Amino acid sequence: MKKQIAILTTILPLVIACAPERDFGEESSKNFPPVISAHVPESYLVDEELTIDASGSLDADGTIVHYFARFGDGSPEVESHDGIFMHTYKNTGKFTISIEVIDDLEEAAERRYEISILSVKPPDCNDEAIKCRPGRECREDGYCYTTD
């Protein structure tokens, strides 16, 4: 035991002396951008109200204070204070949904999602014969959603 303590008392100062210096003041003042996590279906039905949930987005060094969504169909940008968005597409086609979040120190993050708006509802993924693509999960409404 005395030999182990002697080795530690000899090695420990060397380890400390060789450790890189870190300036915690500068690094701790850095503002990291928020991380967006949203549930967006890969397809949805025209004239049916769609709900997008981005409330799972996080900011490691603060709080998210603004959520914005653009639906890619010419409708105006929408702001949400809780990360939940509702939208109804009036036309079929492929659209890009853009979600943006801003934290309390005004750092922003943006993520885009592709969605196909259909005139006929796709098969219900809750049916055991229908499976979502990898990286998607089946929700209670029968649509496959992103899982990020």
Image: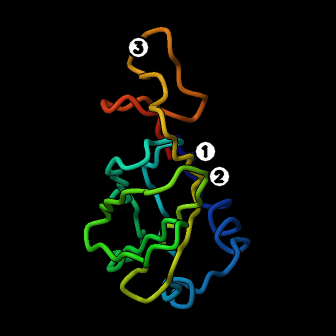
Is 122 left or right of 67, judged from the image as shown?
Answer: right
Where residue 127 is drawn, which disc sits there? 3
**Picture coordinates of residue 67, whole percent (x, y):** 37, 73
Asked whether disc 1 touches disc 2, contact meaning CB atoms under 8 Å apart, the reply is: yes
Return the disc, 2 or 3, that comes first in the chain's sequence: 2
Q: Is residue 8 above or below residue 100?
A: above
Quadrant in the rendering for residue 138: top left
Q: Secondary structure at mark 2?
A: helix
**Picture coordinates of residue 42, whole percent (x, y):** 53, 42
Distance from Cα at disc 2 to Cα at disc 3:
65 Å
Mark 1 neighbour density, 10 Å: few (under 14) some (14–19) many (20 or more):
few
Return the disc, 1 or 3, that comes first in the chain's sequence: 1
Where residue 62 is drawn, which disc sits there? none
Distance from Cα at disc 1 to Cα at disc 2:
6 Å
Is 83 left or right of 110, judged from the image as shown?
Answer: left
Where residue 3 is drawn, which disc sits there? 1
Asked whether disc 1 touches disc 3, contact meaning CB atoms under 8 Å apart, the reply is: no
Q: Say which amino acid is labelled 1.
A: Lys
The residue wearing badge 2 is 7
- Comparing 89 with 60, the one in front is 89
Q: Is residue 58 above or below residue 81?
A: above
Q: Say which amino acid is labelled 2.
A: Ile
Q: Secondary structure at mark 3?
A: loop
Instruction: Name the mark nearer the viewer: 1 or 2.
Output: 2
Q: Secondary structure at mark 1?
A: helix
Instruction: Name the mark nearer the viewer: 2 or 3.
Output: 3
